[in-house]
Amino acid sequence: MVERVPHEKSKAPVSWRRWGWLAGLAVLCLAAYLVIRYMPHSEEVSWSGTAVEYRADDADYAAGHEAVIRGTYTYNRAGKRVFVGDFWIGGLDMDPGTRVRLASEPAGDQFYDAGGQPFTAPVCGVLQSPDGQGAVVLLWDEYRAEAGSIGAALEEGRRFICVGTLLRQDAVVLADTLKQQILGI
């Protein structure tokens, strides 16, 4: 049997000590990649112009509304998306000072009046297009604001507003997707 001298190199191609360093380096690289990939990114959104209201049950219906959407859109690769800012669409029961927090999780949307108090808006939900070219604003099928109480119901999701440069057929697909998310279908 041949004995090795303590300072003699191992015949293994990579020693266990080097494997430890390589494993540590791999873990650090993976952690850096995950942090960068899933770190929230934000961008300013400023859009004003004419938004078009459509009806799912009437292909010929189209009504223009003046709209202002301005705020910060924050997102990450894990799918969490949040918009916080001003949100106003003319012709709906909303004051020009309406603030909004739109979130990607179910029932995460919240509207606030100019005084900062939450309220039920005529908007049921908002969904941005995957390419960022626009958004769909789904309206309640029934919305009543009477002397201190507000009633809203979503049954078929017939009315929606197209914001941005979306075509009607793309907006219909987004409106159906949003309706399914809200109703849990």
Image (tube, helix red, strand yellow):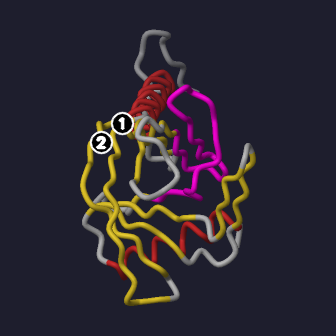
| Mark-to-mark CA distance, 1 and 2 | 5 Å
Q: Is residue 121 magenta?
A: yes
In contact (CB < 8 Å): disc 1 and disc 2: yes
| Residue 13 visible in rendering | no
Numbered range of the magenta stretch: 101-127
Q: Position of residue 151 (x, y in %)?
A: 73, 57
Q: Nearer the viewer, residue 147 or 185?
A: 147
Q: Nearer the viewer, residue 24 or 57?
A: 57
Residue located 42% across and 76% down the image: 54
Residue located 62% across and 65% down the image: 181
Q: Quadrant of residue 156?
A: bottom right
Whether residue 93 is situated above or below residue 7 in the rendered picture: below
Residue carrying label 2: 45
- Left or right of 90 in this view: 57: right
Classed neighbour count for the residue bearing mark 1: other residues with Cα under 10 Å, few (<14), some (14–19), many (≥20):
some
- Left or right of 171 in this view: 50: left
Whether residue 164 is situated above or below residue 22 in the rendered picture: below
User: For the residue marked with disc 1, what is the amino acid?
Assistant: Gly
Residue carrying label 1: 71
Classed neighbour count for the residue bearing mark 2: other residues with Cα under 10 Å, few (<14), some (14–19), many (≥20):
some
